[in-house]
Image: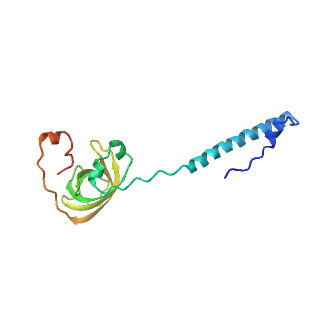
C-alpha cells in the first residue's frame, strides 16, 4: 500500500503562493524526499507483484541428470536417486548407478559412513555441472543395505574416448 502524500508544497510551488525562499526550499526538499520514497516503494511493490519462479522439479534418475547441459546442471536441480555404489573415488567422492545410468557424486566433506562398493543407497542432493559431465552434489546419504552391482558392459575404444561411457559400468 502506498503512503499518503501531501502535495501542499507542490501546489504552493505551482501557484507561486510560497511566502519565502526558505519555505520554497523546504517544499522542494519535501517533494524530492516524497518522490524518492514513492519511487523506491513503487519498485518494491512492483518486485513483489512479479510471479515467483517455478521451483525446479526433483530429478529421480541418474539419466535425467546426465542429460542436463552444464548450464542447466548449474541451476541446482533437487535430486533424489536410489542406486548402488559402483566405485569409491578419492574421498569423499564416489560413483553410483541406478536402473537408468551411472553418475559421479561429489561427496560431502564429512561422510557419516564410508562408501562401500555394492552398497544400496538413497542419495539426496542437487545437480552440478561437474568438471566433465553433470554430477550430483551430495547433501544426504542413507544406506539401504547390500545391493547388486550392475553387469559389466564391453564397449569399444571409440565409445570410451568420446566420454559417453563416463560413470557407466
Report the coloring of the rendering. rainbow
- Toward the bottom, the furthest residue is 145
Label count reads 0
Q: Residue 72 vs residue 116: left or right?
A: right
Residue 113 locus on image (x, y percent): 27, 60
**Who's the residue at 25% across and 65% down the image?**
144
Residue 118 locus on image (x, y percent): 18, 60
Nearest the viewer among 138 and 32 is 32
Q: Residue 110 vs residue 88: left or right?
A: right
Q: In the rendered view, tell whether residue 21 sits above or below residue 107.
A: above
- Toward the right, the furthest residue is 19
Nearest the viewer among 69 and 129 is 69
Residue 84 locus on image (x, y percent): 22, 59
Q: In the rendered view, tell whether residue 23 sits above or below residue 102.
A: above
Residue 149 locus on image (x, y percent): 16, 59
Nearest the viewer among 45 and 83 is 45
**Residue 106 visible in the displayed image:** no
**Who's the residue at 14% across and 39% down the image?**
158
Quarter of the image where one finds residue 130: top left
**Residue 14 visible in the displayed image:** yes
Amino acid at each position: 500500500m502506498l503512503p499518503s502524500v501531501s502535495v501542499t508544497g507542490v501546489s504552493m510551488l505551482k501557484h507561486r503562493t510560497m511566502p519565502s525562499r526558505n519555505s520554497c526550499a523546504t517544499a522542494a526538499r519535501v517533494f524530492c524526499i516524497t518522490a524518492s520514497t514513492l519511487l523506491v516503494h513503487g519498485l518494491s511493490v512492483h518486485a513483489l507483484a512479479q510471479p515467483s519462479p517455478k521451483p525446479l522439479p526433483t530429478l529421480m534418475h541418474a539419466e535425467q541428470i546426465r542429460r542436463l547441459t552444464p548450464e542447466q546442471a548449474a541451476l541446482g536441480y533437487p535430486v533424489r536417486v536410489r542406486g548402488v555404489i559402483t566405485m569409491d573415488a578419492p574421498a569423499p567422492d564416489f560413483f553410483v548407478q541406478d536402473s537408468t545410468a551411472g553418475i559421479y557424486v561429489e561427496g560431502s566433506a564429512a561422510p557419516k559412513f564410508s562408501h562401500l562398493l555394492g552398497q544400496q543407497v538413497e542419495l539426496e542432493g542437487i545437480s552440478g555441472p561437474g568438471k566433465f559431465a553433470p554430477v550430483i552434489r551430495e547433501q544426504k546419504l542413507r544406506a539401504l543395505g547390500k545391493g547388486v552391482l550392475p553387469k559389466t558392459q564391453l564397449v569399444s575404444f571409440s565409445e570410451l574416448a568420446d566420454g559417453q561411457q563416463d560413470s557407466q559400468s
